[in-house]
Amino acid sequence: MLNPIRSDGTFEPTVPLVGGVFFKTADQALVADLEARGLLWKLQPYTHSYPHCWRCGTPLIYYAQPSWYIRTTRIKDRLLRENEETNWYPDTIKHGRYGDWLNNNIDWALSRSRYWGTPLPIWRNDADPAKMVCVGSRAELGELAGLDLSELDPHRPFVDDITFTIAGQAGTYRRVPEVIDAWFDSGSMPFAQWGYPYVEGSKEKFEQHYPADFICEAIDQTRGWFYTLMAVGTLVFDQSSYRNVLCLGHILAEDGRKMSKHLGNILEPIPLMDEHGADAVRWFMACSGSPWSARRVGAGALQETVRKVLLTYWNTVAFQSLYARANGWTPTGSAPAVAERHVLDRWLVSATQQLIVDVTADLENFDTQHAGVLLQEFIDNLSNWYVRRSRRRFWTGDPGALWTLHETLNQLTRLMAPIVPFITERVWQDLFVSTDPDGLDSVHLTSWPVADESLIDTGLASAMKLARRLVELGRAARADAKVKTRQPLRRALISSGARTQLRDALLAEITAELNIGSVETFHAAGDVVDYSAKANFRALGKRYGKQTPTVAKAVAAADAAELSRRLAAGGVVKLDVEGVGEVELGADDVFITERPRQGWSVVEEDGQTIALDLELTPELVSAGLVREAIRFIQETRKASGLDVSDRIRLEWAADDPEMAKAVAGHLRQIADEVLATVTTQGAVGQGWVDDAETGLHVHVEKA
C-alpha cells in the first residue's frame, strides 16, 4: 500500500513539493501545482463537515496503518450456526440486518494506537520481530520476567516496563505498543465479570450463567455489542454468549425528529424521571409501543402514562385501603369460597387468572408491549367497572368484595413489579406487609403469580362483556336523547338473543348502571324503530340502466325493516320486480334510514341494539331530583374534608317546589346515602353551600 503521509500527519520528506508539510497545509500548494500543469478541472470553496481532534482542534485524516487482526472469517460458519440457534426480536433482524453482517464478515481489526485501554498482551523480540509471545495471565508474565507481579497494574505505562528474555535467544521481548479494541472488552464481559478462569469460584459461576438468557440493546448494536459478544463467545467457547436478543428502536423527540444538541430537542433522562417518575418512563419505554420501533418521547406521553395507568392503579389501591380501614377488615381467617361470591367478584377472579395466563405468555415471548396493553385494560376494567359497580358492597363491608379486591391487587402488583418496581414496592409495603407481618418483605422477593385455571369462567367473561357493551350503548342512547344518567328511566329493551346470554345477576348490574327500572326484550327492532328504504341509483344504474326507476319503486315498497335485517346479516335480498324480473340487492344497493319512534332512544352497533323508554312519570322525575340532591350533598361532604365514614347533621332548603317535595318525600333514603343522623329543612344562612343547577342549598357538619 502506498502511503506518503507519516504518522504525524506530514508528507514523507522524499515527496516533491510538499515533503515534510502537514497534509492540510499542503492543500494550497497541491492545488496550485495542478492548476499550473493544466490538470485542475474546477476549484470551488464550500462549507462542509470535517473531522477535527476534539481536544486541540487539529484536522484529522483517515489513515491506513498496520494492525493486529482476529481471523473471524475462519469461524464464519460457526457464527452463522450460532445465529440460527438465537431468538431475535423482531425476528426480521436474524436473517436481515444481523444475518447480512455475518454473511459479509471480515477479519476483526483488534488493535488501537491509543494510551488508554486493555494492553495487547503480545511481547515481541526486538532482535527478531518474527518471534512473539502472547501472554495469558499476570502469573505467566511474572514467570517469564522472573518477577513477582501479583500487585502489578496491568495497564500502560506499568505493563510496558515489563520485559524478559528467553534462554538461547538473542534480544529482549518488549510489549507491542497497541491496546485492544474496547469492543473486545465488551464482548468478553460474560467471563471477565467473574475473573474467569483465575479467580477462585469463577469457573462455577461462569458455567452457571453462560450463555445469558436475554440481552437487550438498541438496533445499532448488531454491529457492536451483539456481534462482539457472539464473536468472542464462539471463538473461546464455541457458543454464543446469549440465547435471546431484543433490539430496541431509537428514541425520538416529541415532534418525531432525531434528538440532537443542534436542534435543541434533547430530553435528559434524569430530569424527565424527576418530573414524571422513573416508573412512568419505564412503563412508557416497555409498554407504550413496539420496543423495536422508533418512538417519540415527551412530557405529554409520560403524563398520559401517569394518568391512565399509574394513578388509576394507585387510586384503586387507596380505595381498597380506605374501605378496609373503615370496616376494620384485615385479610385474616378464611376467604369466602369463590363460587359463593357475588357475580362481580367471580368475574374479577376469573379475569385475574386469565390475565396471569396472558401476561406470562407475552413476557415469555418478550412482548412487553402487549403485556402492557393487557395490564392497562385490566386496570381500567378494575377501576371503572368492578370498583364502580361494587362501591355499595365495599361500604357495607362485604367480605367477598374486600377479599376479592385484596387478592386481585396482590396478583396485579406482582405482575406489574418488573415493569414499575417503585410504585409496586410502595403498594406492597402499604397494603400487604402492613397487614401480614409474616409475609415477604418486598414484592421483588415474591414468586411470579401462577394462574389457577379452574377459576377461569369463559362463559361469565363473555356474558360480562356483553353486559358492558349494552351499558355502553345505553349511555350512548341517553346522550343522544340528552337525558342524564341520574334521571331514572322506566325500562330498556334488548334483543331476545342478548337476553338469553345474560344471567339475572348481570341484568341487575345493567339496570343499576343505566339507572333503569327493568330490562325487557323486543322481538324485532321494528318495535321501537321506523325504517325506510331508498334505492342507490348510482349502484343500481350500472346494472339496470333505464329500468332503475322501476327497481327503485319496488325497493321503496318493500318491508324496510326486513330489508335492513337481512342486509345487516350480510345476505343478498331478492325482489320480484314487475317488468324486470328477479332482482338481487346487496348492502351497497340500498340506503336504510332508521328513525326511533316518539318516546324512545335507540342505539344499534355491531349487531347489538338497546332502546330506552324516555317517558317520564312524576315518580321518575322525583327520583331523578333525589339523585341530584344526593350527588350535591356528597360533593359538599367531600369538599368539607369529612372522612368517608363520618356521620353528619344536614340542613337543607330548595328554591324549586318540585325539588323540595322530592327531598322531603325521600329524607330517609337521602339520610342513608349521605350518612345524616339529623335532617332539617331550614332557612339559608352563613356557611351554606348552593347548587345553581338544582336550586338546592345545604349545610353539613360532623355529627
Image (cartoon, rainbow, N blue to C red):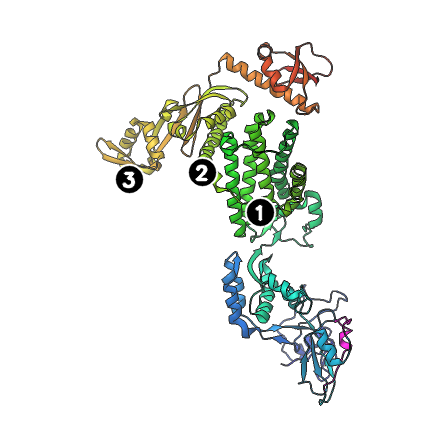
The amino acid beneath tag 3 is Arg
Residue 540, above or below 231: above
Look at discs 1 and 2 and give the one toward the viewer: 1
Mark 1 — residue? 448
Task: Residue lying at the far front in this picture: please name it.
Answer: 333
The residue positioned 56% from the left and 41% from the top of the image is 376
Residue 194 screen position, x and y as percent? 67, 64
**Residue range corresponding to the magenta coloring:** 149-166
Look at discs 3 and 1 and give the one toward the viewer: 1
Give the alpha-carbon distance from disc 2 to disc 3, as whole Å. Answer: 48 Å
Which of disc 1 and disc 3 is earlier in sequence? 1
Look at discs 2 and 3 and give the one toward the viewer: 2
Residue 618, above or below 535: above
In the foreground, 557 or 334: 334
The amino acid beneath tag 2 is Thr
Query: What secondary structure predominates along the stretch shown in magenta?
Result: loop
Mark 2 — residue? 458
Mark 3 — residue? 543
Residue 624 screen position, x and y as percent? 55, 17
Q: Inspect this view and state whether residue 592 appears.
A: yes
Q: Secondary structure at mark 1?
A: loop
As drawn, is 174 to the left or to the right of 81? right
Q: Secondary structure at mark 2?
A: helix
Which of disc 3 and disc 2 is earlier in sequence? 2
Residue 574 magenta-highlighted: no
